[in-house]
Image (cartoon, rainbow, N blue to C red):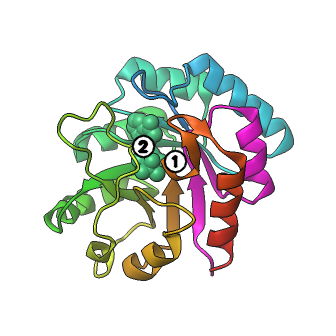
Amino acid sequence: MPPKVKICGISTLESTKTALNDSADFLGFVHFAKSPRHLPLEAMSGLMQVIRRVNVSTPLVSVVVNPDDDLLAALKNDVRPDLIQLHGKESPERVAEIQRLTGIPLIKAISVSEKADLAGAHAYEPHVDYMMFDAKAPKDAALPGGLGLSFDWSLMRHHVAAKPWFLAGGLSSANLSAAVQESGASMLDVSSGVESAPGIKDAGLISDFLKAAKSL
Ligand SMILES: O=C(O)c1ccccc1NCC(=O)[C@H](O)[C@H](O)COP(=O)(O)O
């Protein structure tokens, strides 16, 4: 079974169309002011509404970082994504609270640089539908994700998980096969690897990535 793919950091209808034409399994939209992929909530909501007119089956994911209750209320009441991806330092208790507050299925991202980072993941599992394992950002980085950095994929080999998980960080059409082999991942997430410049998605790179993933 080929890995499922989430194309993250989509901000235009054009890249949405490419991703859907080549059978992306999830589409991610980032709301984080410092990100070159940042979408204000109104724009995210508008784009999602347009997508839903032509495609109701592909889950649309709002990616946020340490969201406060006001942001969660806006996501729940106005944007209404299929999933919320939590990509900050949310504690397991806060994730449980976010689940209660929104009722929207969650993806919790964990930053990984060494094996010890995986141990903390289990505490989130009761509260989420999916986990994501992404490369840990450098201390001085402006963003917690979308940096095109990888971690040692073999760390995931013996990870026993109660929830399905995405592998993220520095993936591209050139390395995804090795990444799947080394990590055992059945779900992949990519952003920079399908861009021609930060925040600029490239139709050819999106197609290449999805075709390479679907051919595994
Ligand atoms: O992509 C961003 O700009 C971003 C900003 C703030 C929080 C999360 C962000 N991205 C989350 C993702 O799911 C990325 O796809 C993931 O980190 C992998 O990125 P990349 O290494 O560029 O493929």
Q: Residue at x 52, y 61 (%)?
A: 172
Mark 1 crowd level (few <14, some 14–19, many ≥20, 10 Å Cα)? many
The residue to which callout 1 is attached is 191
In percent of width and height, residue 183 lies at: 38, 76
Along the line of sight, the residue nearer the viewer: 189 or 171: 171
Ligand 1 contact, mark 2 (Cβ < 8 Å): yes
Q: Amino acid at mark 2?
A: Gly
Quick check: is 9 in the magenta stretch? yes
Task: Work out whether residue 24 can be spotted.
Answer: yes
- Rendering coords of residue 195 (x, y %): 57, 44
The magenta segment: 1-28
Q: Is residue 122 left or right of residue 60?
A: left
In the rendered structure, which amino acid carries the disc numbered 1? Ser
Tag 2 secondary structure: loop
Q: Between 17 and 50, which is closer to the camera in this rendering?
A: 17
Residue 50 occupies which quadrant of the picture? Answer: top right
Bin the neighbour count of mark 2 within 10 Å (Cα to Cα): few under 14, some 14-19, many 20 and up: many
Q: CA distance from mark 2 to mark 1?
A: 6 Å
Q: Quadrant of the C terminus?
A: bottom right
What residue is at 23 percent from the left and 42 percent from the top? 93
**Picture coordinates of residue 10, whole percent (x, y):** 61, 38
